[in-house]
Image (cartoon, rainbow, N blue to C red):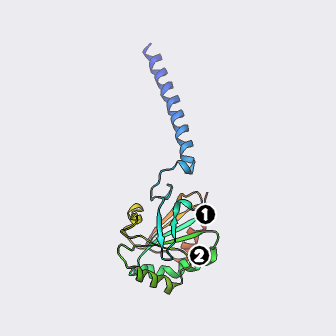
């Protein structure tokens, strides 16, 4: 009798486990159901910021792949990376968007403008300052540059702290463009 109870308990447990795993994996496969976290495999946290051009930009409105690059004008590695971002933006224009989020809380708007003009940024330069939502905090950015690569479903497919070689950066652009 005890043996039958144990067998039934094991069967009920296994069936329950199978149902739980099957239901859980279906929920995870839908990008709309994913939690917003600044980590690979999660939806990119939505934000709205004003650009140097005075336009309000909202991540929630995007339906194409994007690169979100956090930088500052005084950042040496950002200075090195900027020409590579410009070249890749020109190469993949229309297929991917770049948002260059300036750490205006730790920078000055005029310095950000000067940096963007000097490097020929044709993509939006957004200002994350005390008046906004502190997007740097939302994305847990603690070093510059920090770059997130987001696919067309709004899911983060890669993250880079610091800079990488230009060919590696291009691979990450391609992954964001082709990833679903």
Image quadrant occupied by the N terminus: top left
x and y percent of residue 14 in the render? 50, 30
Image quadrant occupied by the C terminus: bottom right
- Cα separation, mark 2 vs mark 1, equals 14 Å
The image quarter containing residue 84 is bottom right
Q: Residues within 10 Å of mark 1 (few under 14, many from 20)?
A: some
Q: Residue at x 47, y 50 (%)?
A: 35
The mark that comes first in sequence, 2 or 1, is 1
Please indicate whether residue 31 sits to the left or right of residue 162 in the image: right
x and y percent of residue 61 in the render? 56, 61
The image quarter containing residue 19 is top right
Name above or below for residue 64 compared with residue 88: above
Secondary structure category for the residue under label 1? loop
The residue closer to the viewer here, 171 or 98, is 98
The residue closer to the viewer here, 165 or 146, is 146
The residue closer to the viewer here, 85 or 64, is 64
The residue closer to the viewer here, 79 or 136, is 136
Q: Residue furthest front?
A: 54
Q: Residue at x 52, y 67 (%)?
A: 57
Please indicate whether residue 76 sits to the left or right of residue 55 in the image: left
- For label 1, the residue is 64
Please indicate whether residue 175 sits to the left or right of residue 132 in the image: right
- For label 2, the residue is 89
Name above or below for residue 45 compared with residue 52: above
Q: Residues within 10 Å of mark 2 (few under 14, many from 20)?
A: many
x and y percent of residue 156 in the render? 52, 60
Name above or below for residue 106 compared with residue 22: below
x and y percent of residue 72 in the render? 41, 77
């Amino acid at each position: 009798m005890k043996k039958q109870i144990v067998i039934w308990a094991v069967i009920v447990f296994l069936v329950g486990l199978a149902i739980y795993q099957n239901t859980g994996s279906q929920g995870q496969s839908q990008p709309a159901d994913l939690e917003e976290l600044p980590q690979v495999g999660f939806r990119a946290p939505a934000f709205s910021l004003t650009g140097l051009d005075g336009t309000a930009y909202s991540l929630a409105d995007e339906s194409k792949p994007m690169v979100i690059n956090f930088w500052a004008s005084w950042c040496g590695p950002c200075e090195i990376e900027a020409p590579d971002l410009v070249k890749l933006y020109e190469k993949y224009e229309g297929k991917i968007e770049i948002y260059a989020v300036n750490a205006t809380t730790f920078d000055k708007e005029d310095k950000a403008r000067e940096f963007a003009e000097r490097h020929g940024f044709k993509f939006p330069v957004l200002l994350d300052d005390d008046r906004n939502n502190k997007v740097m905090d939302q994305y847990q950015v603690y070093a510059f540059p920090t770059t997130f690569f987001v696919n067309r479903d709004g899911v983060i497919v890669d993250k880079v702290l610091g800079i990488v070689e230009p060919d590696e950066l291009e691979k990450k652009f391609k992954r964001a463009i082709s990833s679903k």
